[in-house]
Image: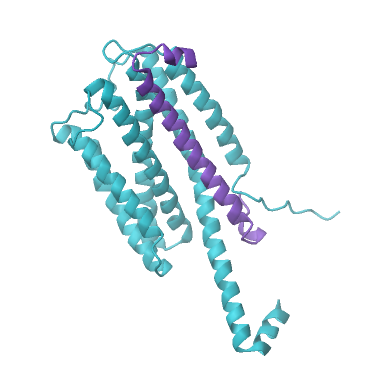
Chain colours: A purple, B cyan
């Protein structure tokens, strides 16, 4: 896939857009999940039962 | 035999989020393959068109997140329940992430197609204003005020996001803009079959990713409230015990 990207016209712009998308969504998801884990330790079990 | 209660989860994960998470990861790999390898290059834009598969779904789901926030804000104003308030806060945060993504990918797409990263035209400027409003919403949520009044102010701002989102959407029809008119909503058959298929898949995958993020973010917000309440209860009990040690013993004994 990386070879296909390098062979493109405007490869830098395409790569920047895709990398930013994956990085921002991935980074945000990781931050939310980490915050959820930290908060789970601060509340009693009956407050964190997900159906 | 006594029934056993399953242990409470130590995170915001559940079977639902695991399924959504797996679908999100697999979907993103599929979209990357379709968007970067399998779909053809455009006759005019060449390979820069591949930015469409991240930019257009991000902006479309941004609108959805804004409307979810506004609807939850409206429902909170009517019902005053924690659930609606938490949903509004979660949707607004996701809308902020998607707006940032839309602005960045749009800017990066603009450079090879328009020759500039940024121009102060109606679509771009109204999107930037929406981004600032969403940043303001986050600041409001963190403002040290009484929770009820903070939620009320956030709900009003949440409702005000809708006219701005409408201005963003219709700006290309109302004013002369460098940005192209809406094409997908008009079912423009000029989009090539493989490109249209890739765009449709990227819409679905971005929707799954947003749903996964929304569930996690909602639960995180719910835990924040529970932790705040728990902390407040503990502080009040401590204060009462300090003021009247015998009452503290009585409370402890009652438990």
The image shows a total of numbered marks equal to 0
Whether residue B249 is visible: yes
Quadrant of the image containing the C terminus of chain B = bottom right
**Can you say whether B226 is above or below B196 in the image?**
below
Whether residue B186 is visible: no
| Residue B176 location (% of width, % of height) | 13, 31
Nearest to the observer: residue B17 or residue B126: B126
Nearest to the observer: residue B107 or residue B211: B107
**Can you say whether B78 is above or below B72 in the image?**
below
Residue at screen point 56% across, 35% down: B21
| Residue B151 location (% of width, % of height) | 39, 62
Residue at screen point 18% across, 37% down: B122
Q: To which quarter of the image does residue B127 belong? A: top left
Q: To which quarter of the image does residue B157 belong? A: bottom left
Residue at screen point 68% across, 53% down: B8
Q: Which residue lies furthest to the right in this view?
A: B1
| Residue B100 location (% of width, % of height) | 35, 39
**Can you say whether B179 is above or below B158 in the image?**
above
| Residue B125 location (% of width, % of height) | 22, 40
């Amino acid at each position: 896939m990386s070879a296909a990207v390098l062979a493109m016209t405007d490869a830098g712009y395409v790569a920047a857009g895709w990398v930013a998308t994956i990085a921002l969504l991935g980074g945000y998801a990781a931050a939310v999940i980490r915050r959820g884990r930290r908060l789970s330790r601060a509340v009693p079990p009956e407050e964190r039962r997900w159906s | 035999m006594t029934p056993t209660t399953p242990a409470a989860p130590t995170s915001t994960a559940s079977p639902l989020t695991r399924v959504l998470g797996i679908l999100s990861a697999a979907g993103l790999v599929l979209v990357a393959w379709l968007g970067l390898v399998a779909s053809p290059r455009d006759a005019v834009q060449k390979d820069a068109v591949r930015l469409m598969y991240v930019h257009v779904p991000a902006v479309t789901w941004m609108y959805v997140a804004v409307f979810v926030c506004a609807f939850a804000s409206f429902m909170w104003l009517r019902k005053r329940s924690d659930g609606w308030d938490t949903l509004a806060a979660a949707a607004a945060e996701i809308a902020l992430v998607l707006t940032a993504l839309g602005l960045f990918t749009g800017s990066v797409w603009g450079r090879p197609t328009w020759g500039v990263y940024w121009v102060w035209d109606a679509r771009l400027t109204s999107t930037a204003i929406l981004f600032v409003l969403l940043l303001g919403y986050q600041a409001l949520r963190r403002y040290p005020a009484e929770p009820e009044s903070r939620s009320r102010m956030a709900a009003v701002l949440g409702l005000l996001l809708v006219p701005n989102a409408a201005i963003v959407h219709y700006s290309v029809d109302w004013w002369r803009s460098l940005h192209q008119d809406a094409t997908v909503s008009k079912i423009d058959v000029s989009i090539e079959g493989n490109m249209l298929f890739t765009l449709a898949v990227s819409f679905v995958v971005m929707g799954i990713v947003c749903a996964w993020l929304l569930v996690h973010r909602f639960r995180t917000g719910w835990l924040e409230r529970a932790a705040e309440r728990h902390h407040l209860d503990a502080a009040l009990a401590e204060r009462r015990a300090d003021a009247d040690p015998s009452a503290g013993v009585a409370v402890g004994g009652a438990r």
